[in-house]
Amino acid sequence: MKKLLVVGCGFYGAVVAERVASQLDLPVTIIDRRNHIGGNSWSEVDPKTGVEYHKYGSHIFHTSNEKVWEYIGNFTGFNEYRHTVLTTYKNEVYTMPINLGSINQYFRKAMSPEDARKFIANEIAKENITDPANLEEKAISLIGRGLYEAFFRGYTIKQWEKDPTELSPDIITRLPVRYNYNHRYFADKFEGIPLDGYGKLFERLVDHKNITVKLNTDFADIKGEVNADTLVLYTGAIDEFFDYSLGALEWRTVDFTAERFDYPDYQGTTVMNYAEETVPFTRIHEFKHYHPERQDTGKTLIFKEFSRFAKAGDEPYYPVFTERNKQLYDQYIAMAAEKAPNVVFGGRLGLYKYLDMDDTVEAALEAFEKIKSRF
């Protein structure tokens, strides 16, 4: 192989491109069907409010992987933002994940950590669920019926458009419950938002003499022009690569409605969940809170988030983990090995796997180590 073609300029594609260009001194072309780099992590400044917003919903960089943190630190500094999430249920606001504060607030008690452990254990025991058959039973077996119905049932229905009793228990392996007042959402060692935004981070990632970026370019339109001496890193959906010849994989997508206000603060936090099924959206993002170090513009921008099944032409966000989709993905992987030996599939879409940003960077660094011998 003499050169690399990267399809999709999210974290996976951009990191592999940067490594090949800088470490192997080889030409890399990146194409993306969008009009910007950065994939779903892209951010830009809203001209009406002066607020930098995450175009595809909130993205908080967090990791305990020092190698990943050190690598990304070559392209950006981070602020000291620490993510917290609140949830509204029946006109009360609770901290999430569930902690001692939210437990005491919900049950109208003032329990100590040990009292709360015993109390929740008793709530779980009331249901006597030893072999959960669905998501609802699994959740109740972990936190009890009261907390589940308050904070997860309605949210889950909106998120998946299915009753939780119809969903596999494998969707959740655990629900975090903290028996202290720690309300920090992530427990990772490193966390923050790029000081100059994700947009600038990606611009620096691909700013190399060996990298050429072509936007508004669909792989389907240039597929026939790819030479045999080109290795293709494909970070789009694997079923789309093969023209859905075996069938379409299922995805969840999200829609956002933006609202702007001529006052400085709408909800006082970055993310507010809405747990009740009667509220049509799952959460509200208020992006200015991601950069408390910046000068306030006196205006604010929010996104209301709505979840639904993706249709043709929609942006896929979350894979739907059913046995049918798992088997279909495995069939596409087998097809790729046979019919596309010069194509490496990666990223959230190519792997049909939900990945946090740090997981994506780690996977990309590992992919580079595996594919560099092919050059």
Image (spheres, rainbow, N blue to C red):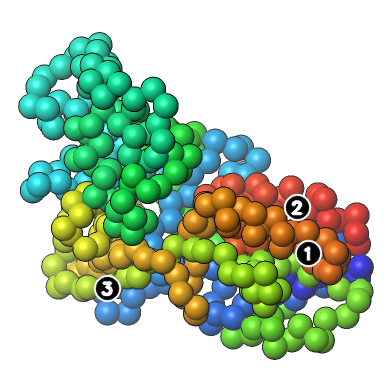
Query: Looking at this view, is 44 or 225 the one in front?
Result: 225
Disc 1: CA contacts within 10 A as few (<14), some (14-19) or many (>=20) = some
Q: Amino acid at mark 3?
A: Ala
Q: Nearer the viewer, residue 47 or 307?
A: 307
Q: Residue at x 39, y 39 (%)?
A: 134
Q: Reading the chain from its start, which is encountered first: label 2 or label 3?
A: 3
Viewed as shown, does residue 210 lie left or right of 72? right
Q: Position of residue 227 (x, y in %)?
A: 88, 80
Q: CA distance from mark 2 to mark 3?
A: 37 Å
Using residue 209 as the reference point, say whether residue 59 is left or right of it.
left
Q: Which residue is mark 2?
A: 367
Q: Nearer the viewer, mark 1 or mark 3?
A: 1
- The residue to which callout 3 is attached is 258
Q: Quadrant of residue 265?
A: bottom left
| Residue 189 in the image: above or below residue 171 | above
- Residue 72 locus on image (x, y percent): 60, 51
The tag on residue 335 is 1
